[in-house]
Image (spheres, helix red, strand yellow):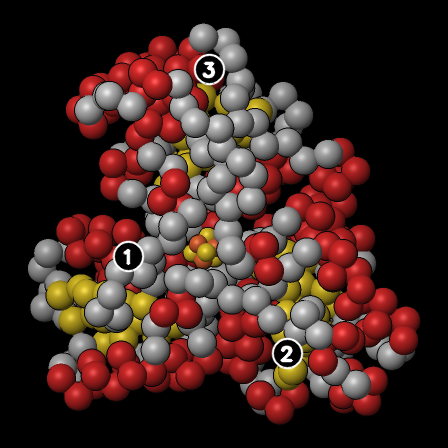
Amino acid sequence: MLFQPPLPTEYASLTDDEMCAAITERKQTLGSRAVILGHHYQKHDVIQFADFTGDSLKLAQIGAKQHGVEYIVFCGVHFMAESADILTDDDVKVILPDQSAGCSMADMADIDQVEEAWEFIVYRCGVAPIPITYVNSSAAIKAFCGANGGACCTSSNARAILEWAFRRGDKVLFLPDQHLGRNTAYAMGIPLEAMTVYDPALPTGGLTREQVRNFRVFLWKGHCSVHQLFTTQQCDEIRRNDPDCKILVHPECSWEVVQKADLAGSTEFIIKTVREAPAGSKWAIGTETHLVDRLLRTYPEKSVRLLAGIQCLCTTMYRIDLRHLLWTLDELVAGRIVNQIKVDPDTSGLAVVALERMLANVTATPVAIK
Ligand code: 13P
Ligand code: SF4
């Protein structure tokens, strides 16, 4: 995670109303020079200033189309800003309002560990899986996938990308979210017995050569700290207390939770499902708190609640706040660029291959994993 230096002291005393008024004014001043992108997990006070909102895939698609703007201010997390930098022209500068907005899942796979895993699986075991990385990963890992015949995916097109991979080989190394990998491969008909976890904390990932030769899917031992808070007990409780309520979860939840759910899919799939549901329908949703809260406010004629009884908050998304957004825009208006996220050209040149494969395998509407 990168370090975010403290903001100048004058920002500490500003009220929310003052910051909102100032952000509105700075946006007008910058006009078409700056575009603000916002992930659906952002706080309500921040997302109201986004020119475009979306999940990881939609924001990558929108980011890639931003020709002629000077700045993309990315209200999301670090890996999303990196992808935007990779996918845009060199003269577009991508800015992350708080540099410490990382992703704990992305941090669970380090490029050195991935190279070590590759060395063991490919050179010592003699098998060559197709490397697929969830976009929630560093640019270096995306570049690794691009250089080794692999691709990126998001939760919106993980199945399309795994199908793409299995047209090119009979084994896949899926990074860094074991749950998205397992849930997607299982939905495609691959049995759990054909999958194994590669644990980077153990020598040779905890696998023998024979196991590597026998398994079809190697799931990196990573997870999302938010989605792991949803449990099968919560699903059981909903079934017991409110049998009419449907359970809708994100595929970063565990396989056990996804099996208990009625439906599972990406953020855009969750939004679409609730939007299209009839009035009076009931939904218990297993994903980040701010999105569930927004759905609840947007569709008061439907009953929407969080699957867990506790707040499931992405603390790194939460670091983007009005204060940091205003500071970033103030600096741009003053002609200074702060918090630029820049991927070096060598890494970018390989990572773009993996990202473009991802963007070439997109369905018109988000597809359910279950
Ligand atoms: P999507 O935006 O692909 O649904 O992923 C959710 C998430 O955890 C983003 O970090
Ligand atoms: Fe990372 Fe999970 Fe937060 Fe998404 S919700 S940014 S995967 S920690």
Residue at (24, 65) in percent of width and height: 310
SS for callout 2: strand
Q: Which mark is residue 332?
A: 3
SS for callout 1: helix
> Ligand 2 within 8 A of label 2's CB?
no
Q: Residues within 10 Å of mark 3 (few under 14, many from 20)?
A: some
In the image, residue 264 above or below residue 352: below
Where's the N terminus, which quadrant? Answer: top right
Is residue 356 toward the left or the right of residue 55 in the image?
A: right
> Ligand 2 within 8 A of label 1's CB?
no
Residue type, label 3: Leu
Q: Which residue is mark 2?
A: 197
Mark sitting earlier along the chain (1/3)? 1
Mark sitting earlier along the chain (1/2)? 2
In the image, residue 286 above or below residue 320: below
Q: Which residue is mark 1?
A: 289
In the image, residue 66 above or below residue 102: above
In which quarter of the view is residue 45 placed? top left
Residue at (64, 37) in percent of width and height: 86
Residue at (79, 60) in percent of width and height: 115
Quarter containing ligand 1?
A: bottom left
Is residue 280 toward the left or the right of residue 144 in the image?
A: left
Is residue 163 toward the left or the right of residue 285 in the image?
A: right
